[in-house]
């Protein structure tokens, strides 16, 4: 059970982080859309990324679809790191943050994608009714 409490904390922290980042993007979506264009990405991707961050963040906080959301977030973090952050270095360049936080968020997302998170989650509540499901007792 101690393991699941730790995973719960990681899930909620990742969810809150992405929800807040998504809400900030949503408030300035036109500027974010233009920025996406300026780095060679289609402007509509800003809406998709923002939606994934907001809905994915909420999903992680309540524990619904944790594994699927974590895979999607992992892909976003890999894309952001390669497309934007890698060039500025691990700690950044003074104007743009580096990829150290992206790496930490990616690691959390990968862990959640592999392990799932059932403590205090809708996924856990749904799975309890499935007789083929067995809780991790650690």
Image (spheres, grey):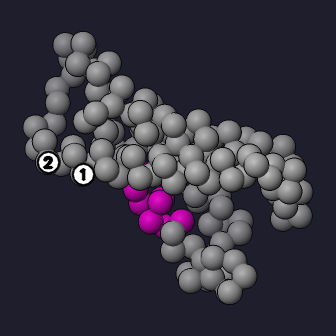
- Cα separation, mark 2 vs mark 1, equals 6 Å
Q: Nearer the viewer, residue 112 or 15?
A: 15
| Residue at x 29% of width, y 21% of height | 125
Asked whether the viewer can see residue 46, the reply is: no
Residue 107: image quadrant is: bottom left
Q: Is residue 121 left or right of residue 3?
A: right
| Residue at x 51% of width, y 69% of height | 101
> Is residue 38 shown in magenta?
no
- Counting from the top left corner in percent of width and height, residue 44 is at 84, 43
- Counting from the top left corner in percent of width and height, residue 118 is at 28, 34
- Counting from the top left corner in percent of width and height, residue 3 is at 18, 48
Residue 67: image quadrant is: top left
Q: Which mark is residue 2?
A: 2
Q: Name the residue tied to disc 1.
A: 6
Q: Main secondary structure of the magenta part?
A: helix
Q: Is mark 2 in CB contact (under 8 Å) with mark 1? A: yes
Q: Which mark is residue 105?
A: none
Q: Is residue 76 left or right of residue 130?
A: right
Q: Residue furthest front?
A: 27
Q: Secondary structure at mark 1?
A: helix
């Amino acid at each position: 059970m101690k393991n699941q409490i730790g995973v719960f904390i990681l899930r909620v922290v990742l969810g809150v982080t992405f929800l807040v980042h998504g809400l900030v993007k949503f408030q300035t979506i036109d500027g974010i859309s233009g920025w996406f264009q300026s780095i060679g990405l289609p402007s509509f991707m800003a809406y998709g990324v923002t939606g994934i961050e907001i809905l994915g963040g909420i999903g992680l906080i309540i524990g619904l679809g944790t594994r699927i959301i974590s895979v999607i977030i992992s892909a976003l973090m890999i894309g952001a790191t390669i497309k934007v952050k890698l060039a500025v270095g691990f700690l950044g360049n003074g104007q743009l943050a580096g990829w150290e936080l992206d790496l930490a968020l990616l690691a959390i997302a990968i862990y959640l994608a592999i392990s799932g998170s059932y403590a205090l989650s809708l996924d856990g509540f749904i799975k309890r009714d499935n007789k083929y499901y067995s809780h991790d007792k650690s």
